[in-house]
Image (spheres, rainbow, N blue to C red):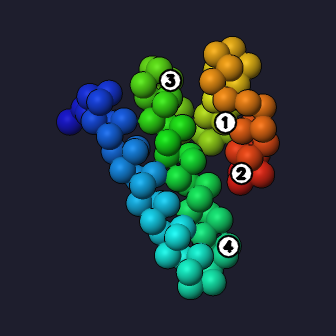
Amino acid sequence: MTLHKEDLIKIAVEKSNQAIKSAKDNLEKGNFETSQNRIYYALFYIVTALAYKNDFITSKHSRLKGWFNKKFIYEDKVFGADMIEIYNELY
């Protein structure tokens, strides 16, 4: 079964939302490393959704990060350069 682009985007956004909830829950419990991991994955999943929307598919975290940096920070200037620093720190 092949999923359509819209389905892939929806799944990635749902995973991001779940990761955010998990990050909050773990933060409240004092599980800081797990919370940080979940925050990173929330970002990873939402950038994956952006990638699907823009017909970019990769399974490599570093390649996705590089694509995001090039496309949304330097070419389209959607985000400021500080965003990639946040992404790098979480990575």
Q: Is residue 63 visible?
A: no
- The type of residue carrying mark 3 is Phe
Percent coordinates x, y for residue 70 in the rendering: 70, 22
2 or 1: tag closer to the N-terminus: 1
Callout 1: few (<14), some (14-19), or many (20+) C-alpha neighbours within 10 Å? Answer: some
For disc 2, the marked residue is: 91
Residue found 59% across the figure and 76% down from its top: 27
For disc 4, the marked residue is: 33
Residue 56 image label? 3
- The Cα–Cα distance between marks 3 and 2, rounded to whole angstroms, is 20 Å
Residue furthest to the bottom: 29
Q: Are marks 1 and 3 in contact (CB under 8 Å)?
A: no
Residue furthest to the left: 1
Percent coordinates x, y for residue 53 in the rendering: 42, 25
- The Cα–Cα distance between marks 1 and 3, rounded to whole angstroms, is 12 Å
Determine whether the residue tagged by mark 1 lies in a helix, strand or loop. Answer: helix
3 or 2: tag closer to the N-terminus: 3
Residue 65 image label? 1
Callout 2: few (<14), some (14-19), or many (20+) C-alpha neighbours within 10 Å? Answer: some
Q: Are marks 2 and 4 in contact (CB under 8 Å)?
A: no
- The Cα–Cα distance between marks 4 and 3, rounded to whole angstroms, is 30 Å
Question: Taking 67 as reference, is 16 left or right?
Answer: left
Residue found 77% across the figure and 52% down from its top: 89
Could you tell me how many numbered marks the image carries? 4
2 or 4: tag closer to the N-terminus: 4
Determine whether the residue tagged by mark 2 lies in a helix, strand or loop. Answer: loop
- The type of residue carrying mark 2 is Tyr
- The Cα–Cα distance between marks 4 and 1, rounded to whole angstroms, is 21 Å
Callout 3: few (<14), some (14-19), or many (20+) C-alpha neighbours within 10 Å? Answer: few
- The type of residue carrying mark 1 is Lys
Q: Are marks 2 and 1 in contact (CB under 8 Å)?
A: yes
Determine whether the residue tagged by mark 4 lies in a helix, strand or loop. Answer: helix
